[in-house]
């Protein structure tokens, strides 16, 4: 019985597994030998294009792997290289190392 001094539910602590994670990718836009590259994304506002430069100090132009797990409201993301750079970018490996062992139940 809940609320009347009887049995109370027990909930596990909620936390962000990714907060200490190390994120890597074997390819990221703008870090190929071709240097900065143009990317385009399609959405409800139509086509929007920008420049991706992994070597830039401007966070709006760098789209490295760590951006995939940062604060979602930061307006950042990870971006793979364009297939225009070659078929080797058709498959990209993206790894999240949580740096700890966790048991996950469904």
Image (cartoon, grey):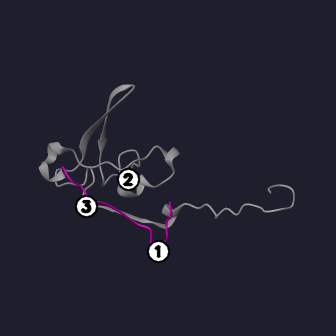
User: What is the distance, in whole Å, between disc 2 and disc 1 at their CAs?
Assistant: 34 Å
Q: Which residue is mark 2?
A: 57
User: What is the distance, in whole Å, between disc 3 and disc 2 at their CAs?
Assistant: 21 Å
Percent position (x, y) of residue 49?
Answer: 30, 33
The residue positioned farthest toward the right in the image shown: 4
Give the numbered dot on residue 40: none
Which range is magenta? 90-106
Looking at marks 2 and 1 on the same chain, the residue that comes earlier in the sequence is marked by 2
Asked if the stretch drawn in magenta spans residue 73, the answer is no
User: What is the distance, in whole Å, between disc 1 and disc 3 at their CAs?
Assistant: 23 Å
Percent position (x, y) of residue 50?
Answer: 31, 37
Q: Which residue is mark 1?
A: 101
Badge 1: few (under 14), some or many (20 or more) residues near its Cα, within 10 Å? few
Q: Quadrant of residue 26?
A: bottom left
91 is higher (above) or lower (below) than 13? above
Q: Is residue 39 found left or right of 105 in the rendered image?
A: left
For mark 2, give the secondary structure: loop
Percent position (x, y) of residue 98?
Answer: 44, 68
Badge 2: few (under 14), some or many (20 or more) residues near its Cα, within 10 Å? few
Q: Give the residue displayed 80% in from the left and 56% down from the top.
A: 2
Mark 2, mark 1: which one is toward the viewer? 1
Q: Which residue is mark 3?
A: 26
Q: Give the residue displayed 41% in from the left and 49% down from the top.
A: 59
The residue positioned farthest toward the front in the image shown: 1
Q: Tell me which secondary structure the magenta stretch mostly adopts.
A: loop
Q: How many marks?
A: 3
Q: Give the residue displayed 24% in from the left and 47% down from the top.
A: 36
């Amino acid at each position: 019985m809940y609320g009347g001094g009887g049995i109370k539910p027990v909930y596990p602590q909620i936390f962000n597994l990714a907060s200490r994670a190390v994120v890597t990718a074997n390819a990221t836009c703008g870090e190929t030998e071709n240097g900065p590259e143009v990317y385009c994304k399609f959405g409800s506002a139509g086509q929007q294009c920008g420049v991706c430069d992994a070597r830039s100090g401007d966070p709006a132009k760098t789209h490295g792997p760590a951006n995939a797990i940062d604060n979602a409201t930061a307006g950042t993301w990870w971006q793979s290289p364009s297939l225009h750079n070659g078929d080797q970018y058709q498959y990209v490996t993206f790894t999240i190392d949580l740096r700890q062992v966790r048991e996950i139940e469904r």
